[in-house]
Amino acid sequence: MDQRLEALGEFGLIGLIRERIRQRSPGMRLGIGDDAAILESRSGCDLLVTTDMLLEDVHFKRTWGCFHELGRKTLAVNLSDIAAMGGHPHHAFLGLGLPVRGISLAEVEAFVAGLEEEADAAGVTLAGGDTCASQSGLVLCVTLLGSVPAGQAICRSGAKPGNGVWVTGGLGGSAAGLLALERGLRPRSPWPDATPRPSWLKSTEEAVIQSAIGAHLTPIPRLAAGQALRGYATAMIDLSDGLASDAGHLCTESGVGVCIQVGRVPLHPGTRVAARWTGRDELDLALRGGEDYELLFTTAGDPRPVLHAALPGVAVTRIGEVLDGPPVPTLEGVDGRREVLAGGFDHLRPAT
Amino acid sequence: MDQRLEALGEFGLIGLIRERIRQRSPGMRLGIGDDAAILESRSGCDLLVTTDMLLEDVHFKRTWGCFHELGRKTLAVNLSDIAAMGGHPHHAFLGLGLPVRGISLAEVEAFVAGLEEEADAAGVTLAGGDTCASQSGLVLCVTLLGSVPAGQAICRSGAKPGNGVWVTGGLGGSAAGLLALERGLRPRSPWPDATPRPSWLKSTEEAVIQSAIGAHLTPIPRLAAGQALRGYATAMIDLSDGLASDAGHLCTESGVGVCIQVGRVPLHPGTRVAARWTGRDELDLALRGGEDYELLFTTAGDPRPVLHAALPGVAVTRIGEVLDGPPVPTLEGVDGRREVLAGGFDHLRPAT
C-alpha cells in the first residue's frame, strides 16, 4: 500500500468512494456512512442492507481452529449492524473463498454449522452466495438484509446536544480475548493439569479470560436491545472499530461533540487481566481495542427501563453526554480536564 | 483442501450448504441454486439479490494492472446474474479487501472509477460496503439488489421438453482473452512496432484478440436482453462457469435433458486464434472456458424478434433443444452421435 493510501486511511478511502459515487436509483433513504443502507420498500417497511468481511490473518487466524465460532461470528458482525439500526434481520448471503491448501471438509462443515446456529438464533435464512477457491487465505463476506418500520431506523446522525451517551455491556473484552488467543488459550479449554501453568495465567482468572475469548470469537449481537430503542434512541452505532473511533463516526454524522467521562467507561472483567499481561492501559483496550459489538447510543432520557426486558443481566451505562461543539469525541479525566479522544483501529494504517 | 472437499467440488459444497440451512424467514420465493435469490416485497415487485466475489490470482492477476477494467467487471458479473433473472439492478454493496503491500491510491482510484462507470451504465447506486486490509491479496465481493415484476423472474427451473435452447453472442472469447493476457498482451495496446513480433501473434489477428481481451476484462451484462425475455423465456442462466457446466445447472433445476448440436455452438472469433496458440480444441474453449457472461435460455418459439431491439448487432443462436430425459446436457456431433457433455470449471477441483 503506498503512503498516500496509508495517509488516507480506511475512513478517508470510504470518504473518497462516497464522493466519487453518484446516487442514481430512487428509493435510497441512506447510503454509505451508516451501519447499514436504508432502501424504501413501499410496504410500510424500509429495507436495511449491510456487508461485512472477515479475512484470514486480519480478523482471525485459521490456526486457532475455531471454525464453528468463526461461522457464528461471520454472521454476528452483520447482525450487529442491523441491531445498530434497530432492525430485524431476515436474509443473509455468503461469499466464501476457500483456501486451496490446508482446509478440510470437517472444518468447512463446522463453519457452516456455526453460521446455521447463529442464523437460527436470529431467525435469519441463508438465501444465497458465492463459493470459490482462494489462492491465499479464507475469505468470508456476508451481506445481510433486514427490515425496520418505515422511517424508524436509528441512524448515526440524530444525536442532539444534551442527550446522554450510553453503552451496553462492558468494553475491552474482545481485545482481551484476542490477546488470550494469541497466547495460545482456546475456547472452553481450561489449562491442562498435566502441563505447568505459565506465571501469567492465574487459575482464579481463567473464567474471566474464557468469557473474554467468548466476547472475541462469538460476540452477541444486541438485536432485541436495538429494536427496543426504536423511537427512543436519537442516534446509534455498534462498536466494531472501538469506542474512540465509533464515537467519532457518530459525532461526524450528527454534527455534534460527545464528552465521555473516563471513570464511567464500563470494562469487561477480562480487560484488566489482559492489560496486566501486556503492560497496556486497560482504558486504552476498552476505548481502542475494537470488536466488542456493543451498542453506543444517545437518548434524551434514561433508556434503562426500555432496555430492561431486552438485555437481562447486561449493564447499560451512561458514559457521557452530547455537546454543542466541534464534531469530535472528547475524554474527560477524573480531574475534569478534557482531551480529544483519538481514534482506534484503522485497517489501512499500520499500527503505531 | 482435503480430498473429501476436492471430491465434493464447488457444486457439491453448495449442495451441502443448501441441505444444512433451513429456511426460516417468510417471503423467500427462491433461495440458493439460481442466479439470484428472489424475495417477495409486497409492492408488485420481487426483490432479487446476488453475490459474486473476484479474488486475486483466482479471477484476475493484479500484475495485469487493469484496475479500471477490474472495477467494471466486479460489478458486471453481478449485473449478469440480475440479467439472467430478467431483472432491473438498482443497489450495489462492495466488500473491498485491500492488500497491505503493492497497491497504490491511483490503482484504487482507477478501480473505483471503473465501478462507477459500470454502475452509471446500468443505473445502479453503490449504497454501502465494507473496506479492510487484506493479507490475502485483493478481495472484491459485490452484492447486487435488483427488482422484477412480482412472479416474473426467469428461473433456471422452467425449461420444458420441446423448447429451443438459445444463446446470445459468441462463446470462448473470455477464455481466449485470458490466454492473451497470460501471454503478456494488454487491452488497447497494439504490439509496439519497435519490438520484434512473436511468431504466434499475427498482425491480422490483433483486432480479434483485443476483442477477446475485452470479453474477458469487461464483459457486457445482457440486461436489456434479459428483461426483454420476461414472459417469453421459460428458463435462463448466465454463462459464468461455461456452457457445459451452466447447461448442467439448468438441466438439474428444470429436471430435463438438453441436447446441444456441435455445429451450432457460436464461437467468438478470438477462440480460434487462442486454440491455435495452445493446441486446445476451439470447441472445448467455447464449452468449458467460462466467464463469457452471455445468456443461455429456453423458449417455446423463436426469440429473435423479441430480442432484436435489446441486442443490436449481437447474434442470438439456437444451439439445441430441451429433451424429456435424464437431467444432464448432451452434445450431438455432426455424425448425429450423442455423448454426455461433461462439466467445465469447478473452483474446488484441481484442473485436469
Image (spheres, coloured by chain):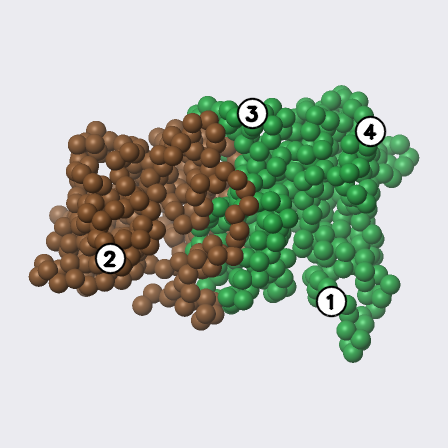
Chain colours: A green, B brown
Circle 1 SS class: loop
**According to the image, label 2 marks what residue?**
B325
Respond whether the residues carrying marks 2 and 3 are from the same subunit.
no
Q: What element carries label 4?
A: loop
Residue A236 versus residue A153: which sits nearer the camera? A153
The chain identifier of the residue carrying mark 4 reads A
Q: Mark 3 points at which residue?
A: A44
Q: Between marks 1 and 3, how big is the CA–CA gap?
A: 48 Å
Amino acid tagged 2: Gly
- Same chain for the residues at labels 2 and 1, yes or no? no
Where residue A140 appears, as percent x and y from the top left, is 53, 52
The residues tagged by marks 2 and 1 sit, at their Cα atoms, a distance apart of 55 Å
Chain-order first, disc 1 or disc 3: 3
Q: Does residue B89 sit above or below B61 in this rendering?
A: above
Q: Are marks 3 and 4 in contact (CB under 8 Å)?
A: no
Where is the C terminus of chain B found, in terms of image quarters?
A: bottom left
Regarding residue B274, the answer to whether it shows in the image is no
